[in-house]
Structure formats: C-alpha cells, structure tokens
Image (spheres, rainbow, N blue to C red):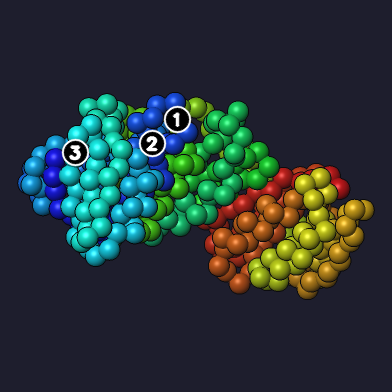
Amino acid sequence: MELRIQKSDFLKGLRIAQSIADRKSTMPILANVLLRTEGKNRLFLSATNLNVSLSAELPAKIEKEGGLTVGAKSLHEVVANLPGEDIVIKRAENNWAELRAGKVQYKLVGMADRDFPRIPDPREATFSEIDPAVLMEMIDKTLFAVSTDENRFHLNGVLFESDGAVARMVATDGHRLAKIERTLTGAPVLQSGIIVPRKGLTEIGKITDSATGPCEIAVAGNHLFVRRGGLSLAVKLIEAQFPPYQQVIPKTNDKVIVIERVALLEALKRASLMSSDTRGVRITANQGVLQVASDNPELGEAREELAVGYAGDEISIGFNPRYMIDFLDQMTVEQVRVELSGELDPAVIRPCEAADYVGVVMPMRI
C-alpha cells in the first residue's frame, strides 16, 4: 500500500477515530484505525469500539492498493504535528506504516488489516436528510442528564422518538429528567423509541458540529447511522426498556414561580459554594420573594433573596443545585418557570416562552 493524502483531509477522519478507538480493550486491534485503499482516489478509514464505529471516505492519490491498521492515538498525534499539507503513507514490512512529509519521516508499528473487525455498513441503510443544528441542540439539552451508573444500563443513553416530522429526546439518571421536542423533518419514522448510548451521542455531536454539508440519519437493525461530510457513524443501540417518562413529569404543580434565568443561575452557583453531595440548597418562595439558601456545618452558610413573580402560599423545597444549574445553563431565554407542588414533590423547570423543553428535578431532604 502506498498513497498520498492532504493533511487536512486525513485529520478530518483521525480526530474522531482516535476518540472512538478503545485503548483499554482486551482486543489490541480495537486501539487501531483501519486504513484501506478503495480504487485509485479514495482512502477508507475506520475505527470502532464495537459499540460506536466510524467510517470515512477520504480523497487520496493511490499509488499502490492495500491496507493496514495503526494505533489511532499515536497516528493522530504524528499527523497533527507533521509539517506541510502533503503526506505520503506506505506499508512497510511487518505491517509497519511509513509516513513522510517533506524531510520528516516516521515509522509506526501496525497490524494486518485482515484482523480488523467488520463494522456496520452505512450503505445498507436508507438515509434521509435532517437539520444538523436541531439534532445538535437536542443532544446538548439532554446528554447531561444521562446516568453514568453502568449497572443501570437502560439509563445510560437518551431515548429517541420520532414520527418523521417531530422528534423527541428524553434522558434521566433517576434524580433528574430532561425532555426536548423539536420539529425534525426527515427524521426516521419509529414505531417505538430507541435508546442511543451516551458515547454514541457524543461522537454524533462531533460530526454534526465539525463537518460540513448535508446531514443524514437512518435506523437499520440495532444501529443508528449518522453521516455528514464524508464521515459516517454507526451507533449500536441499547436494547432495554426506557422508564415511562411521562409518569415522572408532574402535571399538577400549581405553584408557579417566574424568575429571571440569569439571576437564578448566579444565585444557585453562589449558594452551591456552601453545599455538598449530602447537603443541598433550599429555595423558599413567598409573595414576590425567592430565598436561596444553603447551610453546611463544615463550611458555613449562604442566604440570598430575589424578586420573583409569585403570589401563592409559602413553599420551600431542597435539591441538589447542580441539577438545576445544568438546566439553566442549557436555556437561552430571559425568564423561566419553576413549577412546584410540595416539599417532597419533583420540581419542574421550563422556559416561559415555550413548553417544548422540560426539566424535572427530584427533591432532596435538607
């Protein structure tokens, strides 16, 4: 194998490949990226951890056909630091890779391409075009609420529902829940929701954010496919039952507090300095005033009052401030609604101007 490729084209695939390749796997080849020629002007690049797989078709001038695999992280670092824009790649003896750029030459240990696992083929899926900005927004507004507890694998991803015109994403870790609904024309028609794992959504976000051109999506078998700008991602879905999230979202919270988003966000950040994992923040609303307070015997205490739109009876509730801060960080509106019912009931937070983004925060005894 011998080829010539532009550094910028090569890095486009390597940046994502090196974040997918699994260096901790008991299968050493999963730490590698596959390089294989296709015809006279294409290089096929692939990486996988068996759950998330990248395939990229990159323009290249092929002098001699063939393939090999090389450590993804080391190859990315070497290519990123090579001078100029023109790189020559050649397979040497024992599947070593030779890289030359100007007067700089590297030799990297490689492995045979025949040992690389087969990855899902995006050409077997039926794609439709969607708006990448909408998809990116939906991921950003739910990914933070995904559970990191691997024993609760059914919560280790985001539920994705779609009827082909309107799409919905829901995530929960048992302490909070995020739900967003958006018009997403071209999204696949799903008979039931699918659960997309956290790692897959992170890599999908990189493709939709960094690549250019049309963005396409498909669901085939137990994989979600997303492709853009010559990069294709196959994400293995979590085969489990997502909780009935509609039952978690309160529908009778009648105590509604309207408040400036930034003011509440900054007050919670200040109060959180005196909180801990076991001692949260308490908010108390009463006739136009919201008190944000935290009290920690080992650190101290904080008190702050904010003007709010509220005319109901006094209500007080404690919660982990980080959960509320995460929701407020994702919102861009000037005012938000905090909807409460009782001290031991979940709180709901949503933008005042829209009802298509909802956050639910479970209470915390303080």
At 34% from the left and 59% from the top, the residue drawn is 81
Residue 146 quadrant: top right
Task: List x then y, in percent, for residue 21.
Answer: 39, 39
- Distance from disc 3 to disc 2, alpha carbons, whole Å, reads 20 Å
Q: Residue at x 17, y 44 (%)?
A: 90
Residue pointed to by mark 1: 25
* Amino acid on which disc 1 is placed: Ser
217 is higher (above) or lower (below) than 293 = above
- Among numbered discs 3 and 2, the one appearing first in the sequence: 2
Where 54 falls versus 304 (above or below)?
A: above
In this figure, which residue is indicated by the disc labeled 3?
92
Please say whether residue 136 is visible from this viewpoint: yes
Q: Badges 3 and 1: C-beta atoms under 8 Å apart?
A: no
Q: Residue at x 71, y 68 (%)?
A: 266
At x 8% / y 47%, what residue is drawn?
Answer: 63
Rendered position, 65 above or below 26: below
Query: Residue tagged by mark 2?
Result: 31
Please report whichever mark, 1 or 2, sits nearer to the chain's N-terminal start: 1
**Secondary structure beneath label 3:** loop
In the depicted view, which residue is nearer to us: 228 or 264?
228
Check disc 2 and give the amino acid type. Answer: Ala
- Tell me the SS state at disc 1: loop
Is label 1 in contact with label 2 (beta carbons under 8 Å)?
Answer: yes
Work out whether residue 317 or residue 94 is closer to the camera in this orientation and state it: 94
**Residue 1, x across and y down, in percent:** 14, 40
Is 40 positioned to the left or the right of 273 in the image?
left
